[in-house]
Image (spheres, coloured by chain):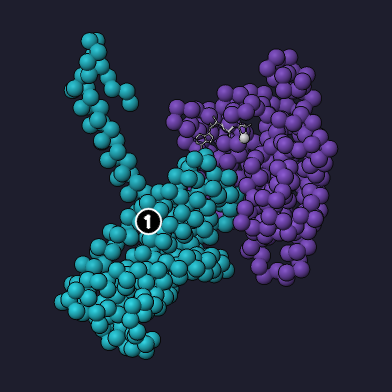
Chain colours: A purple, B cyan
Amino acid sequence: MKKTVAEIEHLNKSFGNNHVLKDMNLKLVEGENLVVLGKSGSGKSVLIKCLVGLIEPDEGKVNILGKNISELKIEELNLLRKKVGFLFQSAALYDSMTVRENLEFPLRDLKSKPKEEINELVEEALRNVGLEDVIDNMPSELSGGMRKRVGLARTLILKPEIILYDEPTTGLDPITSKEISNLILDIQKKYNTSSIIITHDMECARITANRMIILKNGTAINEGSFKELSELNDEWVHSFFK
Amino acid sequence: MPIETNKNGKVNPVRELRSTENSFVKHLKEFFEEITLLTKFTFRFFKEVIKPPYEFNEFVKQSYLIGYKSFPLVAITGLIMGLVLTIQSRPTLAQFGAESWLPAMVAVSIVREIGPVITALIFAGKVGSGIGAELASMKVTEQIDAMEVSGINPFKYLVVTRIVSATVMLPVLVSAANAISLYGAYIGVNLEGDVSFRLFFAQVFDKLSFTDVFPGIIKTFFFGFAVALISCYKGYNSNKGTEGVGKAANSAVVFGSLFIFILDMIAVQVTSLFSR
Ligand SMILES: Nc1ncnc2c1ncn2[C@@H]1O[C@H](COP(=O)(O)OP(=O)(O)OP(=O)(O)O)[C@@H](O)[C@H]1O
Ligand SMILES: [Mg+2]
């Protein structure tokens, strides 16, 4: 049996009266792509934010690479976070920095490395997302889709063991979306990364998913492969696949 | 909250009193919560400022942005301040036939009080609002979260560097503003008279003592610290949403300026205690 790299047990989270996650359980196995489906506002972003400790759960346990994150000291948590990549839904590029500086930012601890090596890493990451020519632009000069791809490059630059993608293809044209989906697949194959992919894009789900879960009313209601879920005899679930 | 009325359509005074009492209690509670959070934020600053690693490059960059970029504004206001103060003081002194006191009197007011306070207020307006808005928008667009998940301590990188830069740069700006202000005063004196540059400054430094200059500069370290602390606190803890950005910038300036006056009042008390 394969190793579990991330696990959520009995997670509960509310904002005031809004009970977003209710007794949520989730397991991510080494080397798999897990796709999370769910309606807008169903708590998908909150779920992965709980995973990296950006949002503190009310109840429940979060385990990453064998460590319970609520028991870690901040230094230990920061070390762990370097092994987890996070692509924000909004890309979250640093506005005051150029694209190059944005990508160099997660590499700050590698200052000892020669400049050429860092440059090479940055250029490679941008080549992966097809944006080598915007390297010296500011984020405000990029389109929404370009920002998203720069965000993806920044996430991938540390070659994380676990990657959390929050809607990686939203706002992209079908061709670029497909390229990004294939990139996600390539990365999984090349580095044996484990990923959670939140998406509404069924094409992306079809290409990348090894396993899928569906979130409804704050908990996972269905689980299975893309094929299994698309053939499921459930009106609500089926509406995702139309 | 709408005012409640009884069934005859009249305001129920007891109810109304109770509801204002409740909202008063609520505001009071919010006020103390805010103070608690600000205190925690301050303690966190002191904890993180001593702990390595130090973000030296970012500190230099912020000092450039906070200090150098504010210089033109501070210089212009300083010059006008000296000029106007001299022009305004002349008639009063002339009434007593004490016009020859003009340089010394203006210099003492500038160096002791007007230079530090006015410059700090300008600083709160320019730098405080800038920090408040910048950090709030970084919060809203998840940039602070992004730093956190890449294993970098955003408090250290963003907050500590800005507070330290502001604390160091404001005294420098105030010193410069004082010097330019004195030059403004020199121009002001010469608008209606003829005092040589050397004579003017001889008169100024004859009356200006260490106890005028030193406390005036020392207090600006506290002004700079307070302005940046408040701005960072407001920005870093801003509510989500674009509305929060404007609010953070606004309350950074309002509370920053308020703190300057409170600290100035304390500084005056302390100074007079020592100069007795
Ligand atoms: N910081 C917060 N404070 C208060 N409520 C929040 C916060 N973050 C999320 N929520 C609430 O939690 C719920 C789930 O939000 P979340 O962002 O996880 O949705 P989502 O599934 O990612 O939706 P989408 O597909 O639109 O991105 C929403 O109702 C939202 O209002
Ligand atoms: Mg979301």
Residue at left 19%, top 74%?
B95
Indicate the quadrant where residue A223 lies: top right
Q: Which amino acid does label 1 sit on?
A: Gly
Q: Position of residue A176 (x, y in %)?
A: 81, 40
Please say whether residue A109 is visible from this viewpoint.
yes
Q: Position of residue A84 (x, y in %)?
A: 65, 49
Position of residue A51 relative to residue B168, above or below, is: above
Q: Is residue B150 left or right of residue A238?
A: left
| Quarter of the rendering occupied by the N terminus of chain B | top left
Residue at left 39%, top 66%?
B119
- Name the quadrant where ligand 2 sits: top right
Front in this rendered view, residue B269 or A171 = B269
Q: Name the residue under label 1.
A: B256
Indicate the quadrant where residue A24 lies: top right
Indicate the quadrant where residue B274 lies: bottom left
Please rate how many residues cluster around mark 1, counting C-alpha atoms within 10 Å: few if below 14, some from 14 to 19, many from 20.
many
